[in-house]
Image (cartoon, helix red, strand yellow):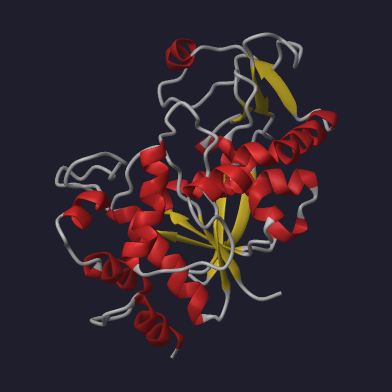
Amino acid sequence: MGLRSRIAPTPSGLLHPGNGASFVLTWVIARAAKGQVLLRIDDLDRARFRMEYLDDIFFTLDWLGIDYDEGPASSQDFLDRFSQSRRTDLYHEALRQLADLNLLYACDCSRKRIREQSQDGRYAGFCRNRQLSLDSPDSAWRIKLPDDCAVSFKERQREMYVSLNLSQLMGDFILKQKDGSPAYQIASLCDDLHWNINLIVRGEDLLPSTGAQIFLAQQLGYDDFQKATFFHHPLLTDAAGEKLSKSAGSTALASWRAAGESPRAVWRQAAQWLGIEYQGETPGEMAAMFRT
């Protein structure tokens, strides 16, 4: 099997330049290797889902000039055939396997309690030994991490293996929300396996998520995911040095499109992350340059 990567936006806000550059980066690496690209839209967060945000994904990809080989052709096609709600059986089966391995426990802690018990916001394990039933009402499911949980993975950008101590970075993270919905870590892992993804491009703020998903794959025997390659790119920041967030206004690519601006600045940011000088007119030219 050749290289398979994915573009995985969430319809929880309007996309910003960092999102766009990450999409272009993914596309260029895949096309330079004659690989395939999947469009996977993560819509588990229904509280923040809006149709305008879903539509914005398709408008943005068209504006950026990048295509994909698999995935929804439109917003309606996504809702009809590709929503994560259509794959919940996969997520719940993985959760069942983890429960059978005695790796999960119920937690009814509020955010207030967690803040009171942890100065850095990392969950301190209050419910770990309380032996609450997994069926307890208004409870989330957390994973039991070893005290010194080291994971490693292949980092394409640095051409080396990166090691993380997951216990120190995250603590016992949530896999099932209090409302019963699967959490991001398990859903993203299952989706990448479902589509045979072997190159995952994401921001460096998601390094802990990569570690979390590697750990879950180890417990579940998902060998293919453990063999995947990762590329963690830097983050774009605003004038105050803060990470860009999805929003309206001048930081949204929708505003750039409305003003008739070119996507060249986004393309060149992706080229900078790749370490190449690019002054071309299409992402295809960048892929050809990266290939050579």
Q: Residue at x 46, y 55 (%)?
A: 202
Q: Quadrant of residue 14?
A: top left
Left/right placement of residue 159 relative to residue 61 reads right
Q: Residue at x 60, y 18 (%)?
A: 178
Where 288 sits versus 100, above or below?
Answer: below
Residue nearest the observer in this picture, 115 or 14: 14
Q: Quadrant of residue 103?
A: top right
Where 122 sits versus 70, above or below?
Answer: above
Q: Quadrant of the C terminus?
A: bottom left
Q: Quadrant of the N terminus?
A: bottom right
Q: Where is residue 228? Give x, y as percent.
A: 64, 63
Furthest residue to the bottom? 292
Q: Where is residue 143? Give x, y as percent.
A: 67, 30
For the image, the number of numbered tags is: 0
Left/right placement of residue 80 relative to residue 46 reads right
Q: Residue at x 41, y 83 (%)?
A: 290
Q: Residue at x 74, y 41 (%)?
A: 90
Q: Where is residue 182? Give x, y as percent.
A: 64, 31
Q: Where is residue 212? Give x, y as percent.
A: 60, 43
- Specify whether residue 188 is in view: no
Residue nearest the observer in this picture, 7 or 67: 67
Residue nearest the observer in this picture, 184 or 162: 184
Where 89 sits versus 37, above or below?
Answer: above
Q: Quadrant of residue 102?
A: top right
- Specify whether residue 161 is in view: yes
Left/right placement of residue 7 relative to residue 214 reads left
